[in-house]
Image (spheres, rainbow, N blue to C red):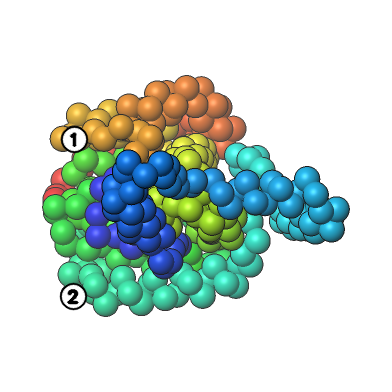
Amino acid sequence: MFATRAGIPRLSPRPSLSRPNPSLQVQRQIQQSSQRARSRIGYGHQRPQYNRFSRAQQLYGLWKTSPTFRTGIGAAGVGAGSFYVYNLEQVPISGRRRFNCVSPGREQNTADQMYQQTIREFGNRVLPEYHPQTRMVQRVLNRLIPQSGLKDQEWEVRVIDDKSQMNAFVIPGGKVFVFSGILPICDGEDGLAAVLGHEIAHNVAHHAAERMSQTYLVIPLALLASYLFDVSGNISQLLVDYAFLRPGSRKQESEADYIGLMMMSESCYNPEAAARLWARMEAAEKVAIPQFLSTHPSNHNRLEKIQKWLPEAEAKRAETGCGSTIGYADDFKKAFRNESIW
């Protein structure tokens, strides 16, 4: 996703751990113990204490005394480690190593469900193909696709007539959705190329499959924490969310910024437009929540990283042979743009 994500479904929603809430049972036990202790004051009885780490201590005791238990834990660890290493792969363009155990076929099946859900929600607000906004999005997409490595997908463009949302997303399989509210802040085709390049980059990197794969890692961690420390499933889910899922999501967003920037540069769009776009996004931002609470990097940090990557992006554009003519093309578009798209 790009800017404001409220109301836009994700391909791999965070898991909801449906478990009994042991903390309520603990509170009842403590209350009952306290009542018994109060009734015994003066008779030499000591108030009972609740040990939250009793299960962890029991497992530690097994580890110390049972060779069979240690062997079983070691075998499970080797198996899990082998599975993790076997499913490590390199992300195209960025070169990042990541864990991904979800096949392209399963990712596409999930994407098909997402596509049908999105059509049901927004289908009655989609602008026609001949609308100037739809035609502009299609023009930009046509230049980006050859550089994406995804030419074999069935690309479709839908512009949703909703000026209140500054958002866009691309569902795996080539289904492009752009809310009309983001077009003014794009300020032309170069800015739109930055937006679409970012969204296409999520598909190039198979970020949806990576997010699905992460659930196979984090759900066992949450369940283990809930069992060992006798905490609520909701608490363990929050801990896993803020410790693993949200940082991972921010990493994916930064990676999509980088891949999208290189893609738009190779498509002969001006990469400086991406920096100007995020400067406008930062200026338009009404409330900036702390980055560690968000699934996305802050607009300010994204702007700083893009500015850092600009020399590399300019070099990419020069390698394509379009750097010498891009200035003339920009001047031509500014001078002769007479078709209103807003």
Residue in the image at 39% along x and 71% along y: 114
Based on the displayed image, in which of its 4 quarters is residue 336 positioned? top left
First in residue order: circle 2 vs circle 1: 2
Vertical order, 307 against 173 (above or below): above
Disc 2 residue type? Asn
Q: Is residue 77 above or below residue 279?
A: below
- What amino acid is labelled 1 in the image? Val
For this orientation, the residue located farthest to the front is 43
- Bin the neighbour count of mark 2 within 10 Å (Cα to Cα): few under 14, some 14-19, many 20 and up: few
Q: Residues within 10 Å of mark 1 (few under 14, many from 20)?
A: few
The mark found on residue 38 in the picture is none
Q: Which residue is mark 2?
A: 124
Element under disc 2: helix
Viewer-nearest residue: 291 or 144: 291
Q: Mark 2 or 1, which is nearer the eye?
A: 1
Taking the spot 32% from the left edge, 27% from the top edge, the residue there is 300
**Left or right: where does residue 52 sit relative to residue 24?**
right
Residue at left offset 60%, top offset 72%: 105
319 is higher (above) or lower (below) than 220: above
Q: Which mark is residue 287?
A: 1
Q: Decide if residue 162 is in sight here.
A: yes
> Which secondary structure lies at badge 1?
loop
